[in-house]
């Protein structure tokens, strides 16, 4: 298969990618207004990045606790992706698998019940696995109130998150008004994100990295301080859970990334930091499809969490 050779990525491309990671349904014209380009130019750049493999696919990210699932976040000291995924599936469903520089892999596992018991199972199955955080669905702030109609639209969006409203209405046999209202509900919910999977190796002169910080107290204050000082280098919306803060950032070289890391490390309230440089990103959606299947069996209009993950 012929892969298009892309000219060097520039700051416009990175800004476009950043907007698409936050909401890949953002119209080209709207992106253009934000970055200072025409909608036609934005569309052309997105197409080129798709053909060159910078943008691998458009997808949806749903926080598992919002659908009643717990999550185990861990770091594995090897990058044997296939072997890791095989073991993860003995415990639950992979949420994300990200091999990183330094022969380590950051992972998330979606589990239904008994998160503590399954955490111990992970430790026994995967040698030297380091558990970063376990997030019980009951303790999470993520919540969604979905109807059977919402799940029907979600199922269609999983196939193509950028699909036009008219097309979704046609396939789901729902009105465009209903589809529009549901998508708007999804877009304002922090537990649901229209995003992209990109290839970190093809960012060329830019480096994407994730900075994990454990915060001792007042995580909102710490997050705000970081956003004020380093917001221009954010690649995605920061993720918070309990005392964990994960920043998705980019830099023009590894040395500047290191400087940012050390400055953030010194912020009052942060007790531990770790940096990950991804080589590849995988974000399976099998567990979401299973939730949709379970929800479709419900006889009620509003689907209770217990009916989703049973």
Image (cartoon, rainbow, N blue to C red):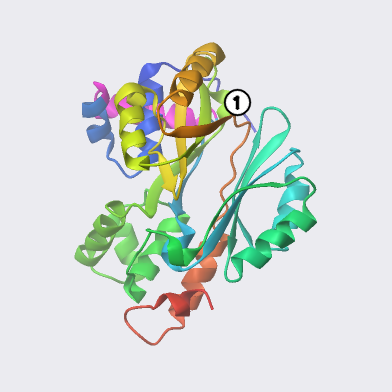
Depicted 310 relative to depicted 215: above or below: below
* Secondary element type, mark 1: helix
Question: Magenta segment, which residues?
Answer: 35-52
Q: Mainly helix, strand or loop, the magenta region?
A: helix
> What residue did someone put label 1 on?
201
For image coordinates 41% across by 63% down, the residue present is: 66
The residue located at (78%, 56%) in the rendering is 125
State left or right for residue 109 relative to residue 124: left
| Front one among 309 and 133 | 133
Residue 178 sits in which quadrant?
A: bottom left
Tell me which residue sits at (37%, 58%) in the image.
141
Figure check: 284 above or below 305: above
Vertical order, 46 against 193 (above or below): above
Q: How many marks?
A: 1
Q: Is residue 47 magenta?
A: yes
Query: In the figure, 204 relative to 214: above or below?
Result: above
How crowded pointer 1 is (Cα within 10 Å; few <14, some 14-19, many 20+) is rated as some
Residue 229 visible in the snapshot = yes
Expressed as whole percent of the image width and height from the top left, the position of residue 143 reads 36, 63
User: In screen coordinates, is 235 left or right of 102?
Assistant: left
Task: Inspect the magenta stretch and tell me whether residue 42 lies in it.
Answer: yes
Q: Position of residue 114 (x, y in %)?
A: 61, 70
Q: Tell me the quadrant of the picture where the N terminus can be found.
A: top right
Q: Quadrant of the C terminus?
A: bottom right
């Amino acid at each position: 298969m012929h892969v298009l050779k892309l000219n060097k990525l520039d700051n416009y491309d990175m800004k476009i990618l950043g907007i698409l990671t936050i909401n890949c349904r953002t119209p080209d014209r709207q992106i253009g207004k934000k970055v200072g380009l025409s909608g036609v130019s934005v569309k052309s750049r997105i197409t080129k990045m798709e053909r060159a493999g910078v943008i691998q696919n458009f997808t949806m990210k749903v926080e598992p606790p919002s659908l009643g699932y717990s999550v185990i976040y861990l770091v594995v000291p090897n990058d044997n992706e296939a072997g890791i995924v095989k073991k993860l599936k003995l415990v639950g469903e992979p949420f994300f698998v990200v091999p990183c520089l330094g022969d380590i892999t950051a992972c998330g596992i979606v589990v239904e019940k008994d998160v503590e018991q399954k955490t111990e199972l992970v430790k026994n199955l995967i040698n030297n696995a380091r558990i970063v955080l376990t997030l019980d669905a009951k303790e999470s702030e993520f919540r969604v109130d979905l109807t059977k109609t919402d799940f029907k639209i979600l199922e269609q969006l999983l196939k193509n998150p950028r699909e036009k409203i008219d097309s979704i209405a046609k396939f789901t046999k729902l009105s465009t008004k209903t589809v529009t209202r549901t998508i708007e509900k999804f877009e304002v919910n922090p537990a649901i994100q229209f995003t992209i999977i990109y290839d970190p190796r093809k960012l060329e002169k830019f480096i994407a990295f994730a900075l994990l910080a454990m915060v001792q107290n007042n995580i909102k204050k710490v997050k705000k301080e970081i956003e004020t000082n380093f917001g221009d280098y954010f690649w995605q919306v920061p993720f918070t859970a309990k005392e964990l803060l994960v920043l998705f950032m980019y830099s023009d070289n590894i040395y500047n990334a290191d400087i940012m890391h050390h400055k953030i490390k010194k912020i009052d309230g942060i007790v531990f930091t770790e940096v990950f440089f991804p080589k590849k990103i995988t974000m399976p959606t099998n567990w979401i499809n299973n939730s949709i299947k379970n929800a479709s069996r419900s006889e009620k209009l509003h689907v209770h969490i217990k009916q989703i993950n049973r």
